[in-house]
Image: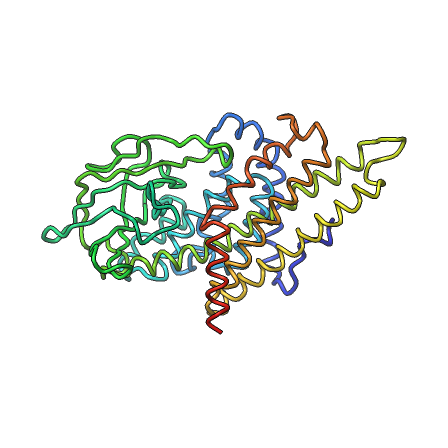
Amino acid sequence: MDRLQQTHGLTAEQREIVATVRTFAEREILPVAGDLERADAYPEQIVAGMRDLGLFGLMIGEEHGGLGASLLTYALVVEELARGWMSVSGIINTHFIVAWMVAQHGTPAQRAHYLPRMAAGDVRGAFSMTEPGCGSDVAAIRTRAVRDGDAYVIDGQKTWLTNGATSSLVATLVKTDPDAGHRGMTTFLVDKTPGFGEVAPGLTVPGKLSKMGYRGIDTTELVFDGYRIDAGQILGGVPGRGFAHMMDGVEVGRVNVAARACGMARRAYELAVDYARRRETFGRPIAEHQAVLFRLAEMATKVEAAHQMTVMAARRKDSGERNDLEAGMAKYLAGEYCKEVIEDAFRVHGGYGYSTEYEIERLYREAPMLLIGEGTADIQKMIIGRRLLEG
């Protein structure tokens, strides 16, 4: 199994970071993930450990107190975290998307104000595009911000915010010019108090959404009712650029989701191999039966293929090139393969795969989120097809 998911050409520093996170996942995440997931409990100690490791500032520049790591390094870290528990990687991903957007598109004042505190983990980010009834149709959002002197007044409802309660900064997409299509959208940097209820005047986090998987972290709605915000909180300082800002963040987020899928698939494969070696039928381990052996071979091939495509997408972004095609391919392939590998691991476990005492049951419930997060599989295929036809 050590031959799977190898990444060639890493520096000594990159290898050290990945090894450190792998050890952290083994010692601090895997032993408690099952209990926390069943209780739907926020992993406070794990998050504190990630903060101590500097993971909240992994890709934030050194000039702002971060580690200044590449997207590739980040993707490899996410693989290790998701191998331990996919929910934990979601906490970091959402935070990172906001930090990326501020670093790439924020004004100098916004970068100086937010990034050092985000790198330290004192400010944690969430981002908000989705609304009830809109789904992947971002252009159909209804939340509006109306200019009122030097401020804007926001009204509307958002949903499916990861870190919705624990965050203190939410990058929120709204319409400032409803008649201008994508050019009428603006991203606001919304400061709030962590928690539920009214977290700022005119801003409410109603409660945590109940989910079949991806538990333990807070996924919430966000309700704006006459919420006033200074015009200086527009990301980049200029209205009308929010859609492009959000798509840039989501493009990076898709590499993250692909990496999560790689980590989960690797864990499912490991569980299947371990079980197949221990479980005996007809006088020998089931791993020696051709049907199981073929299944393991197919699983390993998918684990490796997804990892290599994710590495390619991350490296392309790191080179400064457009990577929406590669990120879409990686997210689509890794998500689909992850689902298939976990289902095969479930089959290898037989009846025990249906038991909550076995880890594969949790993975089986978590995998579907990867098919819809950061754009559904069908959305990825639309992106891929259109980019290919561009030539």
Q: Residue furthest bottom?
A: 391
Above or below: residue 363 compared with residue 265: above
Q: For residue 281, what is the image quadrant?
A: top right
Q: Residue at x 69, y 41 (%)?
A: 344
Observer-nearest residue: 365 or 50? 365
Above or below: residue 85 compared with residue 230: above
What x and y, as percent, mark residue 365? 56, 35
Q: Residue at x 35, y 54 (%)?
A: 115
Image coloring type? rainbow
Q: For residue 28, what is the image quadrant?
A: top right
Q: How many marks?
A: 0
What x and y, as percent, mark residue 221? 33, 37
Above or below: residue 121 compared with residue 38: below
User: Would residue 140 be found to the left or right of residue 389 on screen?
Assistant: left
User: Would residue 173 be found to the left or right of residue 292 on screen?
Assistant: left
What x and y, as percent, mark residue 100? 40, 56
Above or below: residue 196 compared with residue 93: above
Q: Residue at x 45, y 42 (%)?
A: 91
Q: For residue 210, what is the image quadrant?
A: top left
User: Would residue 371 be found to the left or right of residue 248 on screen?
Assistant: right
What x and y, as percent, mark residue 382? 47, 59
Observer-nearest residue: 193 or 343? 343
